[in-house]
Amino acid sequence: MSKKQDSLLRKYAESVGGVIFTEIAVGERSRYSERRYIDGVRVVAPGVSPGEVQKLHGEEFRKLIEGKTVEAIEVDDDLNRWVIGQAVVGKHMLEIRYGVYAAIPVVVCKVRDESREQACARLGVKVWCTRQDRFLVPVASSSKQAAA
């Protein structure tokens, strides 16, 4: 993840709270890439701590998220088809690899695109924009449901 993307992810963490774990491996190597990663994963829970970004991998990470509702977070400067696709696929790969209860795909971006926001709403992808410091596309599944 680039420094610019890291900065966007930190802004998101500060706004929503909780801990975001970065660069989580969700797939094995292929002939085109070293490994497949999700930019960030956040456990969705009410009454969470102030925003924090950290690394945690392996069995410790698995124990922390197993059976929980999490966000599969992808970061890019603008809301484009590539990052939306990464969030959707990352959600499913996270659920398969780590046995989470449910993963909510989230895109964190700086530049919005209203037509793609509409597509995200249909796909169930939450979109958080750093310029507006809020969700542009909220999805019904939230921490309230995770607490139930």
Image: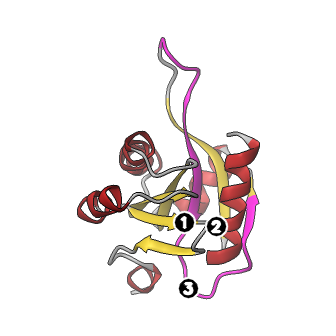
Judging depth in this view, the residue of 119 and 62 nearest the camera is 119
N-term-proximal mark, 1 vs 3:
3
* Three-letter amino acid code at the position of disc 3: Pro
Label 1 – label 2 distance at C-alpha: 8 Å
User: Helix or strand or loop: what does disc 1 sit on?
Assistant: strand
In this rendering, is residue 145 above or below 132? below
Which residue matches tag 1?
A: 129
Q: Nearer the viewer, mark 1 or mark 2?
A: 1
User: Helix or strand or loop: what does disc 3 sit on?
Assistant: loop
In this rendering, is residue 31 above or below 116? above
Image quadrant where residue 47 sits = bottom right
* Three-letter amino acid code at the position of disc 2: Tyr
Image coordinates for residue 64, horizontal then vertical, percent: 61, 62
Q: Nearer the viewer, mark 3 or mark 2?
A: 2
**Residue placed at 51% from the left, 50% from the top?**
78
**Residue placed at 66% from the left, 50% from the top?**
22
**Neighbour tally class for label 1: few under 14, some 14-19, many 20 plus, Cα within 10 Å:** many
**Neighbour tally class for label 2: few under 14, some 14-19, many 20 plus, Cα within 10 Å:** many
Image coordinates for residue 7, horizontal then vertical, percent: 74, 55
Reply yes or no: does residue 96 show up in magenta.
no
* Three-letter amino acid code at the position of disc 1: Cys
The span picked out in magenta is 31-53
Which residue matches tag 3?
A: 46
**Residue placed at 29% from the left, 66% from the top?**
121
Which residue matches tag 2?
A: 12
